[in-house]
Image: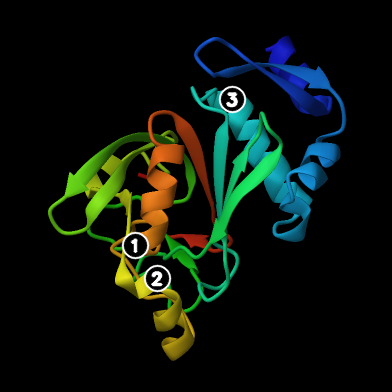
Amino acid sequence: MFIFLYLYLTCFSAFHPSPAGRLEKVAPDSIKVMYRACGASRHIPFSLFKKSVKGFLKFQPRKSILAIADMSKPSDQKRLFVFDLKERKMLEATWVAHGRNSGMRKARLFSNKPNSYQTSPGFYLVGNQIYSPKHGQALVLDGLEKGINDKARQREIIMHGAEYVAEDFIRKYGRCGRSHGCPAVAPEMIKKLAPVLQGGSLLYIHAAGKFSDSAD
């Protein structure tokens, strides 16, 4: 507990990978230095980056890759950002869809319930690549937060490609199309992201709306 509190309250700069690539040690430095160095300051608020890194330290994914989906932004804006924390650089900035019952242009409602067709917020471990009969190349997502997104497997929430996230669609309709709750990306983007994210990276979906589930 003391070690985690120290890592959270101090600043972070140098990440040291284990032989498996996992980031286990953090040297004191300013988290704002990393925030600026990897280009996050041009896209997301510092508070969101800090919260995401805190989650990264808590869940200790095997890979040094952190993806942040900022659902406080409307879907016609790029709001999925992928960072390599070890290398301190941003790998991708792209569009990502939210669930059809979460809202139109902007996600306002969030849920963990099956058949809600809403986005579930929180931290996810990105698993292996799969082939979806409906969507093709995709990534398995495991929700790490009980009561918030832990029904991701039951809901078949995956990251997949979809034509309704294409730039032409956004230009025509002024927003992305919407999924059944999956963080869908453009078809060409899933081809780029799958090998980077698969097998142990961390995804954080940031919600700035109402979590509509009841307490039970």
Tag 2: amino acid: Val
Residue for point 34% across, 62% down? 187
Q: Name the residue under label 1.
A: 187
Q: Nearer the viewer, residue 53 or 138?
A: 138
Label 2 and label 3: CA atoms lie apart by 31 Å
> Is the Cβ of the residue at disc 2 closer than 8 Å to that at disc 1?
yes
Residue 22 sits in quarter: top right
| Closer to viewer: mark 2 or mark 3 | 2
Residue 64 sits in quarter: top right
Tag 3: amino acid: Lys
The answer to whether 83 appears left or right of 175 in the picture is: right
Local packing at callout 1 (Cα closer than 10 Å; few below 14, some 14-19, many 20+) is: some
Q: Which colour scheme is used?
A: rainbow
Kindly state the secondary structure of the residue where label 3 is placed: helix
Q: Mark 3 points at which residue?
A: 58
| Closer to viewer: mark 2 or mark 1 | 1
> Is the Cβ of the residue at disc 3 closer than 8 Å to that at disc 1?
no
Kindly state the secondary structure of the residue where label 2 is placed: helix
Q: Nearer the viewer, residue 158 or 37?
A: 37
> Where does the image place residue 33, in percent across and percent down from the top left?
85, 39
Q: Which of marks 2 and 3 is nearer the N terminus?
A: 3
> Where does the image place residue 165, in percent across and percent down from the top left?
39, 70
Residue for point 79% across, 27% down? 12
Q: Name the residue under label 2.
A: 165
Kindly state the secondary structure of the residue where label 1 is placed: helix
Q: Is residue 104 above or below residue 199?
A: below
> Is the Cβ of the residue at disc 2 closer than 8 Å to that at disc 3?
no
